């Protein structure tokens, strides 16, 4: 269960970073639109990392924002219940777009299984 949570959190943070980055500063120089990854840009403390997490989460909308905010909170408190619940809900909401009833049921079961 812990390894699943770690994978979920890593995936969430990666998708948060990708979703929050836009590039487009017109400065040239081959900007790939990725998140800043240089050591100078890395947070120095847990509090700074959590603050940056909240800033990036605020740039998102809908379920992605709720899940990201829950992940930031889990980083602060260590309680992962809310982030698991938010991720489960985001996953279940995504299954609403699956037209085939059998495939939808299978996806819903995967959401429940992978966010426990």
Image: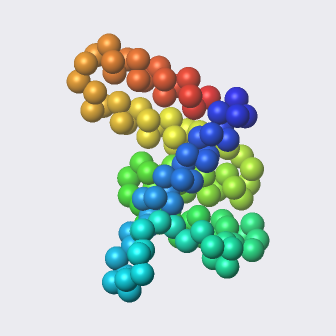
- Dividing the picture into quadrants, the one containing residue 81 is top right
Residue 7 placement (x, y as % from top left): 62, 39
Give the residue furthest to the bottom.
27
Q: Residue at point 67% right, 79% down?
A: 40
Residue 14 placement (x, y as % from top left): 54, 53
**Above or below: residue 115 compared with residue 104:** below
**Above or below: residue 51 compared with residue 98:** below
Can residue 17 be seen in the rendering of this structure? Answer: yes
Quarter that holds the N terminus:
top right
Q: Residue at point 56% right, 23% down?
A: 113
- On the rendered structure, is 15 left or right of 98? right
Quarter that holds the C terminus:
top right
Q: Residue at point 76% right, 71% down?
A: 45
- Dividing the picture into quadrants, the one containing residue 107 is top left
Can residue 82 be seen in the rendering of this structure? Answer: no
**Above or below: residue 68 compared with residue 46:** above
The residue nearer to you, when weighing 38 against 78, is 38
Residue 3 placement (x, y as % from top left): 70, 34
The residue nearer to you, when weighing 25 against 116, is 25
């Amino acid at each position: 269960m812990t390894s699943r949570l770690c994978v979920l959190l890593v995936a969430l943070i990666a998708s948060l970073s990708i979703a929050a980055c836009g590039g487009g500063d017109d400065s040239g120089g081959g900007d790939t639109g990725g998140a800043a990854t240089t050591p100078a840009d890395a947070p120095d403390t847990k509090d700074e990392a959590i603050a940056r997490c909240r800033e990036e989460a605020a740039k998102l909308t809908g379920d992605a924002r709720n899940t990201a905010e829950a992940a930031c909170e889990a980083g602060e408190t260590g309680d992962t219940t809310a982030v698991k619940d938010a991720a489960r809900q985001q996953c279940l909401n995504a299954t609403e777009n699956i037209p085939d009833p059998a495939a939808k049921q299978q996806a819903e079961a995967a959401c429940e299984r992978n966010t426990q």
